[in-house]
Amino acid sequence: MNLSKIWRDNIDEYGEYPILIYEGEAYTNVHLDEASSQLAHALRDMGVEKGDQVVVTMPNCPEVVVAFGGVIKNGSAVVPVMPLLQTQELRYILDDCTPKVVLTTNTLFSKVQEASKDLASPPQIFTLEESEQENALQAAMQKAPATAPDGHIHEDDDAALLYTAGTTGAPKGVMLSHKNLYSNAVAASKKAEILKLKTGRVSLSILPFSHAFGYTMMNVAFMLGDKNVLLPYFEPVKVLEAIEKYKVTHSAMVPAMFHALYNHPDADKYDTSTFFACISGSAALPKPIAEGFQKKFGCLVLEGYGLSEAAPIVTATDPRQKIKPGSVGQPLPDIEVAVVDEHDQRLPANEVGELIVSGPNVLKGYHGKPEETEKILKDGWLYTGDMARIDEENYVFIVDRKKDVIIRGGFNIYPKDLEELLLSHSEVSEAGVIGIPSEKMGEEVGAYVVKKRGSDIKDEELIAFCQEHLAKYKTPRFLKIVGYLPKNVIGKIDKKQLREWAKDFHATSK
């Protein structure tokens, strides 16, 4: 299971074709395969050896695909880093994984330089874009062979080091092998193959390839012979224009993107009739948004579940099988799931517990953090930290993050339930629910809400709405209407930041 095999298999099965469309220009699979092979040789000539780390920080563009391919073919481990990270965040990663090389863009070059200052082992920094001055790496690539270098790559060798978002602490480097990533892409492609259309597959790649979900969906697209329309950043109008212009058939997105497209006032002005299916992952997709999106765009919304530690996809909805509302589908082939209580005892069907995962996709461990690794890997099972239930047909229903569960007076309250209720209100655009420390009850329920444009709904009206539909102890003790909700770089609501905001609630509640 060598991840670089994806390139050769793509060419052997589909022949030469335009695999990427970026800013109106087409790039063939053969061209990108050759360029990535040249990069692999150039890296090796510059002293980057098998097992070394190479950081790649770029938005979606042809160069990032070449970079990933070249690093993998060299036998090195790619460290994808979101380009939106701040300098201090990037510095933490560089200091933690000590890469020999950073591959970036002209616009990000100075930020990488600043982040590398005074490091004990500063990396060499290169761009792959055309510029007025050619760098040493580009010069070496021009002289290098256009075929992959020799060298045995074992399936257990590191292929990628993916850093978690760090929403509950410092980011951790998730060590993923070739077997982890290759097996996950194969399993996911089997689920996605049913969506292959007679007119061909045209994928819109919006998810950052530097994110675990986007990285694996890129591999899946190559396995299935997709033509991929790349967007460097998510902009609703650009997405709608691309769907119309390139007759896009499918895409993968995170909930924040579904929300933005569903609520865009000009969405109906674009021809999205070819848009057949959209995969949702990375965070829970609220039912009102999922149902509204399917109706508005006339496409299937297929939910899945995953995490970086599982390379990343664990479950997916299969349109050939029964689709159960609220479920993230069944496990991918060769992956097992179960739920356990606080004593690690297996729970029967439909009881809520922590979701655990076993399979060829489960990470090797956290880079340089053996104690953290021991907390999540037990007897071959990955403890996800997510609360879930599994029904009699092995459908998984995610209830909430274990760390987000609110315990009020000894009763468990799941923020997701309240968030979905708030989002069902006609005047609510977004909602985030957290637990707030309380001396009397242990925790109280707090909610932050973004109302829809033009709405004059009041805090107390929304609290009353919640109390009409849920037991009173499950409803917000504090609710505040705000102009926006903080989000991380992939679009998830940043609960850590909400808890910082909620310190004001805590102060006023004493």
Image: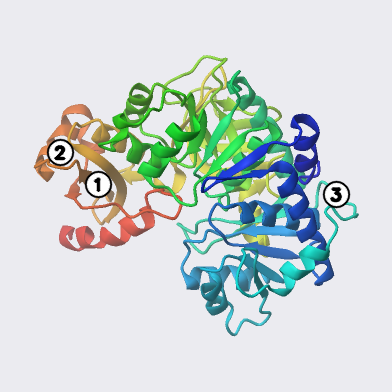
Question: Mark 2 falls on what kind of element?
Answer: helix
With respect to residue 363, does 86 lie above or below? below
Residue 367 shown left or right of residue 110 in the figure: right
Q: Position of residue 36 (x, y in %)?
A: 74, 54
Question: Mark 1 falls on what kind of element?
Answer: strand
Q: Position of residue 449 (x, y in %)?
A: 22, 45
Q: Position of residue 47 (x, y in %)?
A: 82, 72
Comparing marks 2 and 3, which lies closer to the viewer?
3
Label 2 – label 1 distance at C-alpha = 10 Å
Q: Residue at x 59, y 85 (%)?
A: 118
Q: Residue at x 68, y 32 (%)?
A: 225
Q: Amino acid at mark 2?
A: Leu
Viewer-proximal residue among 489 and 30: 30
The image quadrant where one finds the N terminus is top right
Label 2 – label 3 distance at C-alpha = 56 Å
The residue to which callout 3 is attached is 154
Comparing marks 1 and 3, which lies closer to the viewer?
3
Q: First in sequence: mark 2 or mark 3?
A: 3
Label 1 – label 3 distance at C-alpha = 49 Å
* Local crowd size for mark 3, using a 10 Å CA cut-off: few (<14), some (14–19), many (≥20): some
* Local crowd size for mark 2, using a 10 Å CA cut-off: few (<14), some (14–19), many (≥20): many
The residue to which callout 2 is attached is 462
Q: Which mark is residue 447?
A: 1
With respect to residue 119, does 23 lie above or below? above
Residue 122 shown left or right of residue 420 in the figure: right
Labels 2 & 1 near each other (Cβ < 8 A): yes
Q: How is the image coloured?
A: rainbow
Question: Could one spot residue 412 in this view of the protein?
Answer: no
Q: First in sequence: mark 2 or mark 1?
A: 1
Viewer-proximal residue among 400 and 225: 225
